[in-house]
Image (cartoon, helix red, strand yellow):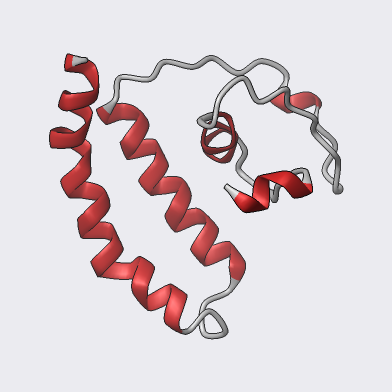
Amino acid sequence: MFHFTKAVFMVGARIIGSYFAWIRKYAKHPEKYPFEVRYFRLQKLLRKLNRGLSVEYHVDGLEKLPEETCCIVSNHLSAFDPLLLITCFDKPCTFVSKKELANR
């Protein structure tokens, strides 16, 4: 329980600050900001979040990925998996989910 409380106090302010600093601006005028700019800004925020939560991860085989578009399948053990995938890949990626998850 202490871990979650620590996360809220250490990282919560950073996320709220980022929301008011640039996420609202990007959401209001997405046509002004290319997808790559928004993606890399989110990636930077998620890396800070991982550091604040003391998340350790190790990625093997990124050099084996092709340069062109590819499909990566994840088993999504938790809701944190897509956020971790965003931090791992240097190129922007998108996600596909089943229709039932839209009602959550």
Query: Residue 31, percent across and down?
Result: 57, 84
Quadrant of the image occupied by residue 18: bottom left
Q: Residue, x 35% and y 73% (percent of image)?
A: 24
Q: Is residue 96 visible?
A: no
Query: Residue 33, percent across and down?
Result: 52, 77
The answer to whether residue 63 is above or below residue 48 is: above
Q: Residue, x 82% and y 43% (percent of image)?
A: 67
Instruction: Please give the count of numbered marks on the rendered protein.
Output: 0
Q: Is residue 44 visible?
A: yes
The answer to whether residue 8 is above or below residue 3 is: below
Left or right of 104, for residue 97: right
Left or right of 48, for residue 3: left
Quadrant of the image occupied by residue 70: top right
The answer to whether residue 30 is above or below residue 57 is: below
Q: Residue, x 24% and y 24% (percent of image)?
A: 4
Q: Residue, x 70% and y 51% (percent of image)?
A: 94
Query: Residue 2, percent across and down?
Result: 16, 15
Quadrant into which the N terminus falls: top left
Left or right of 75, for residue 29: left
Query: Residue 90, percent across and down?
Result: 60, 43
